[in-house]
Image (cartoon, rainbow, N blue to C red):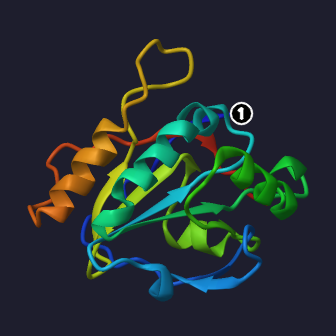
Amino acid sequence: MARTESNMLPLGTIAPDFTLTDTVSGKEINLKTLAAKKATVIMFICNHCPYVIHLNNELVKMANDYADKDVQFIAISSNDVENYPQDGPELMKKHAANCGYPFPYLYDESQAVAKSYDAACTPDFYVFDGDLALVYRGRLDASRPNSGIPVTGEDLRKALDNTLEMKSPLEIQSPSMGCNIKWK
């Protein structure tokens, strides 16, 4: 595991479109179909990363907290499953069920989606407004495994609340940190 910070994609970037398989439903899903009218959160995560495991409960809580506010959460795993079989689609489906993910968990087999978002680590978070323009990229909060800092989702929650209130993007946005995406 190489500790990696996220790349800071320029604010205002339009979300690259994609069609990926949802490992939970088995259906092909398109970003345009999933996107919410007010905000869409795209998260690059995986099953085995300790940084993601550390945040899983908050991800579920946050997605449920914002479900009635016209915010869509979308999780994507782009890891190389040949070298990291624990991140394969069948195990993603089981992992989503065990964690109670209330959002689709998509498999990016070609890694083209991760590359189009300039994703670098798991977890890596992006918030897009109703026009699918990037308004936040970075961390969930300051907590890391074994840091003693509680997981609150503070940074991502502020970004979402700001977006829902149609305010300008947050001035301070800190990169996420986690395991590097396992490239082929």
- At a point 39% along the width and 42% down the height, the residue shown is 139
Whole-percent x, y for residue 147 in the image? 48, 15
- Residue matched to label 1: 1
Q: Residue furthest front?
A: 68
Q: Residue furthest top?
A: 148
- At a point 46% along the width and 47% down the height, the residue shown is 6
Does the image show residue 122? yes
**What amino acid is at disc 1?**
Met
Helix, strand or loop under label 1: loop
Whole-percent x, y for residue 49 in the image? 68, 38
Whole-percent x, y for residue 87 in the image? 80, 52
Eyeballing the image, is 15 above or below 166?
below
Residue 146 image-quadrant placement: top right
Closer-to-camera residue (67/8)? 67
In the rendered structure, the answer to whether residue 104 lies left or right of residue 141 reads right
Closer-to-camera residue (38/19)? 38
- At a point 55% along the width and 63% down the height, the residue shown is 103
- At a point 36% along the width and 77% down the height, the residue shown is 36
Eyeballing the image, is 135 above or below 179?
below
Whole-percent x, y for residue 129 in the image? 26, 72
Query: How many numbered marks, from 0 up?
Result: 1
| Quarter of the figure with the C terminus | bottom right
Residue 27 image-quadrant placement: bottom right
In the rendered structure, the answer to whether residue 140 lies left or right of residue 106 reads left
Does the image show residue 182? no
Q: Residue furthest left?
A: 167
Report crowding for label 1: few under 14, some 14 to 19, many 20 or more residues within 10 A (C-alpha): few
